């Protein structure tokens, strides 16, 4: 399936989840998550949504490899979770020793749920596509799971997000494979152009895995890039 067909043929996920993939404006997105926040975790966990756990372990493995033979310790890395939602990624990063994590999301209601979990240092309610939402080059790692997806962010937002990362730092992004390959998303072309331009280099790539276990044919991967030059 391409991305449109993947959404159309999703049979086992809640309607609100499908609605989230078809919002057209930031205002629609904020309104949807305002209503969904209280039920969000149970809806996704009930369908075997496993991407946050996978990305946390991919990050642990990648950063441990990067730090091997240096005096840098993975637990010293500062993280910004872009599109943090209710904090599912940080819930998995926290037990692995990563504690310097900040959240960025457009939905205050989702951030309120995340705050109750005690896994973030600070929580920022702002648009992830706004490169001025946080200071430039202020994080070692930006992680984004379920945010570069239909109805949310596409490849045009990658430049904004990269501005948050220090040179030598990392960008970890989980993407549905169909969305990555969809020319309309501009994800594959943007990331390729940034690699060719020497701005980022691919550090690690996970295998294709089920995005949620109720529909195992819907695949995702985690791309881990290292930032090799300052953002423009």
Image (cartoon, helix red, strand yellow):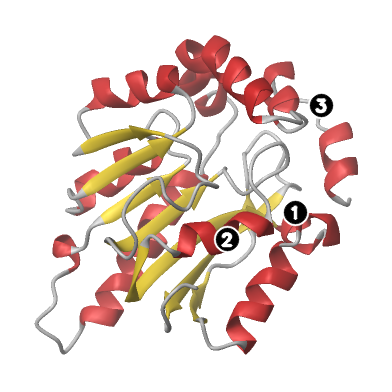
Q: Is residue 177 above or below residue 196?
A: above
User: Is 103 on the left-hand or right-hand side of 148?
Assistant: left
Q: CA distance from mark 3 to mark 2?
A: 30 Å
Q: Is residue 144 above or below residue 115?
A: below
Q: Name the residue located 63 percent from the left edge and 72 percent from the top edge.
A: 191
Quarter of the rendering containing residue 63: bottom left
Residue 28 at x, y = what percent?
68, 21
The answer to whether any part of residue 195 appears in the image is: yes
Q: Earlier in the sequence, mark 1 or mark 3?
A: 3
Callout count: 3
Q: Is residue 147 above or below residue 179?
A: above
Q: Name the residue located 55 percent from the left edge and 55 percent from the top edge.
A: 174
Q: Which residue is mark 2?
A: 158
146 or 102: which is nearer to us?
Answer: 102
The answer to whether any part of residue 9 appears in the image is: no
The mark found on residue 179 in the picture is 1
The mark found on residue 149 in the picture is none
User: Is 19 on the left-hand or right-hand side of 153?
Assistant: right
Q: Secondary structure at mark 3?
A: loop
Label 1, residues with CA under 10 Å away: few <14, some 14-19, many ≥20: many
Label 3, residues with CA under 10 Å away: few <14, some 14-19, many ≥20: few
Camera-nearest label, 3 or 2: 2
Camera-nearest label, 2 or 1: 2
Q: Earlier in the sequence, mark 3 or mark 2?
A: 3
137 or 54: which is nearer to us?
Answer: 137
Q: Which residue is mark 3?
A: 11
22 or 60: which is nearer to us?
Answer: 22
Quarter of the rendering containing residue 163: bottom left
């Amino acid at each position: 399936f391409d991305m449109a067909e993947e959404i159309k043929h999703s049979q086992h996920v809640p309607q609100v989840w499908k609605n989230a993939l078809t919002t057209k404006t930031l205002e629609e997105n904020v309104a949807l998550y305002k209503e969904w926040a209280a039920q969000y975790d149970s809806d996704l966990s009930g369908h075997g949504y496993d991407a946050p756990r996978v990305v946390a372990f991919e990050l642990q493995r990648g950063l441990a490899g990067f730090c091997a033979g240096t005096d840098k310790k993975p637990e010293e890395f500062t993280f910004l979770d872009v599109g943090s939602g209710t904090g599912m990624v940080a819930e998995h990063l926290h037990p692995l020793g990563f504690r310097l994590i900040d959240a960025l999301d457009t939905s205050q209601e989702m951030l309120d749920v995340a705050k109750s979990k005690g896994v973030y240092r600070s929580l920022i309610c702002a648009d992830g596509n706004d490169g001025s939402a946080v200071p430039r080059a202020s994080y070692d790692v930006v992680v984004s799971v379920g945010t570069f997806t239909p109805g949310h962010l596409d490849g045009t937002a990658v430049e904004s997000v990269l501005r948050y990362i220090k040179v030598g730092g990392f960008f970890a992004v989980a993407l549905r494979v169909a969305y990555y390959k969809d020319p309309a998303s501009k994800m594959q072309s943007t990331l390729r152009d940034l690699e060719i331009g020497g701005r980022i280099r691919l550090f690690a790539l996970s295998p294709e895995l089920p995005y949620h276990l109720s529909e195992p044919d819907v695949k995702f991967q985690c791309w881990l890039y290292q930032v090799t030059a300052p953002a423009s």
